[in-house]
Image (tube, rainbow, N blue to C red):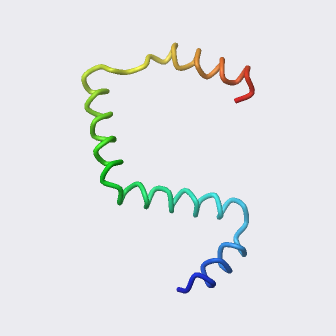
């Protein structure tokens, strides 16, 4: 498929399909990025060692950001 055909296909998509396609492309890029894979492994290992955020703290952060309109 040529670039022009891809552009035409994307232009024909509704917003929901474009959002899915954009997320798919981002996930594909990340899956092929060795730095991302290394970072993901490092973060998972940290979480498994107990370096986590509790749900109450997460809710507090969420509420704070929501109040700021973020």
The residue at 73%/66% (across/down) is 14
Q: Is residue 10 above or below residue 43?
A: below
- Measured as percent of width and height from the top left, residue 54 is found at 44, 16
Quarter holding residue 31 = bottom left
Q: Does 19 sit above or below residue 53?
A: below
Please indicate whether residue 35 sits to the left or right of residue 15 in the image: left
Q: Residue 15 location in percent, x, y?
A: 72, 61
Q: Quadrant of residue 46?
A: top left
Q: Quadrant of the C terminus?
A: top right
- Residue drawn at 29 percent across, 19 percent down: 50
Q: Quadrant location of residue 22?
A: bottom right
Residue 36 at x, y = what percent?
A: 36, 48
Return the residue nearer the eye: 26 or 55: 26
Q: Across the whole image, how many numbered discs are drawn on residues?
A: 0
The residue lying furthest to the front in this view is: 35
- Name the residue rendered at 65%, 63% in the picture: 18
Q: Is residue 44 above or below residue 57?
A: below
58 vs 48, left or right, is right
**Residue 17 percent location from the top left of the image:** 65, 64
Q: Is residue 32 left or right of residue 17?
A: left
Vertical side of 37 occupied by 68: above or below? above
């Amino acid at each position: 498929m040529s670039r022009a055909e891809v552009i035409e296909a994307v232009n024909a998509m509704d917003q929901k399909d474009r959002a899915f396609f954009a997320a798919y492309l981002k996930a594909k890029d990340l899956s092929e990025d060795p730095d991302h894979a290394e970072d993901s492994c490092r973060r998972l290992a940290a979480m498994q060692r107990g370096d986590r955020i509790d749900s109450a703290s997460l809710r507090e952060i969420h509420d704070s950001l929501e109040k700021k309109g973020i």
